[in-house]
Image (cartoon, rainbow, N blue to C red):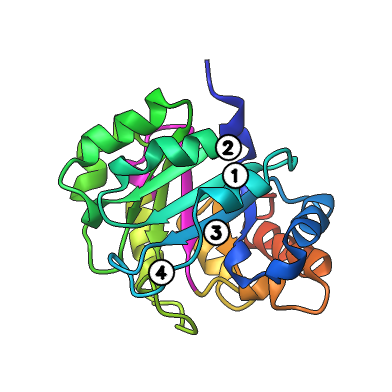
């Protein structure tokens, strides 16, 4: 039986990294009211990527929001931290293929903890790890910028990689893209096969995040003639 959370991993997934943390809960509730079913939470450790962002306490602060809490772990050896994030309320635990020599174990552990398992690939990483673990992957994440540095532009070759990942992912799995997703790039991502579109400044960096997310959703739907 399919996990009901998989059906909600679609459309625009606003990244709280771009939100106003002084109004975090209210901003998240605003975009959920606008139709969002996934909230993306970027966790960085200062080792795998240069910045340090947030930990399980922020996930716990969003517990009870009517959306899937999609936790993207840009951290070294994520298998050491999965239990803490699961206890905090993470619905999805996404680990990077580049961050652990125990990828198969980490994905399996995420599932054992009751979360959906996500696999993220950096721009310079091929799809072999997804091919080897696809039976464990509920969410395949294509990074369309190099993780850890803000203000980067969408890497144009990412669309071809999204298509390759979509072809490998098991039926029903979400295909997610993260980095530089905005009004100018979203259509190409959807046409390539992305079903979940992470957007940070394109949502929370706008005067009205609710309106912004609805506009992105309309552009995504128009790209294929149906809602993503």
Q: Which label was assigned to residue 96? A: none
The single residue placed furthest to the top in the displayed view is 1
Q: Which dot, 3 or 2, sits closer to the camera?
A: 2
**Residue 217 percent location from the top left of the image:** 71, 60
Q: Which residue is mark 2?
A: 89
Q: Which residue is mark 3?
A: 190
- Badge 4 or badge 2: first in the primary sequence: 2
The reply, left or right, for residue 131 in relation to residue 7 is: left
Disc 2 element: loop
Residue 208 in view: yes
Q: Which dot, 4 or 3, sits closer to the camera?
A: 4
Q: Which dot, 2 or 1, sits closer to the camera?
A: 2
Depicted 186 relative to depicted 31: above or below = below
Q: Which residue is mark 4?
A: 144
Please report contact status of discs 3 and 2: CB closer than 8 Å, yes or no: no
Please report contact status of discs 4 and 3: CB closer than 8 Å, yes or no: no
- Badge 4 or badge 3: first in the primary sequence: 4
- Badge 3 or badge 2: first in the primary sequence: 2
Residue 168 within the segment the image draws in magenta:
yes
Q: Which residue is mark 1?
A: 69
């Amino acid at each position: 039986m399919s996990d009901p959370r998989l059906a909600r991993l679609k459309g625009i997934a606003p990244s709280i990294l771009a939100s106003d943390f002084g109004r975090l809960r209210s901003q998240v509730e605003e975009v959920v009211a606008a139709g969002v079913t996934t909230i993306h939470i970027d966790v960085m450790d200062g080792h795998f990527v240069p910045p340090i962002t947030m930990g399980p306490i922020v996930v716990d602060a969003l517990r009870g929001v009517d959306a899937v809490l999609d936790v993207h772990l840009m951290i070294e050896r994520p298998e050491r931290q999965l239990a803490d994030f699961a206890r905090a309320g993470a619905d999805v635990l996404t680990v990077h293929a580049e961050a652990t020599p125990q990828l198969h174990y980490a994905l399996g552990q995420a599932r054992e903890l009751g979360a959906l398992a996500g696999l993220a690939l950096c721009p310079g990483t091929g799809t072999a790890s997804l091919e080897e673990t696809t039976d464990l992957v509920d969410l395949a994440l294509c990074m369309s910028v190099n993780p850890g540095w803000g203000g980067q532009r969408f890497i144009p070759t990412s669309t071809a990689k999204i298509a390759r990942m979509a072809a490998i992912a098991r039926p029903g799995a979400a295909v997610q893209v993260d980095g530089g997703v905005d009004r100018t790039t979203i259509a190409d991502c959807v046409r390539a096969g992305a079903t979940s579109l992470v957007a940070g400044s394109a949502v929370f960096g706008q005067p009205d995040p609710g309106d912004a997310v609805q506009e992105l959703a309309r552009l995504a739907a128009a790209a294929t003639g149906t809602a993503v």
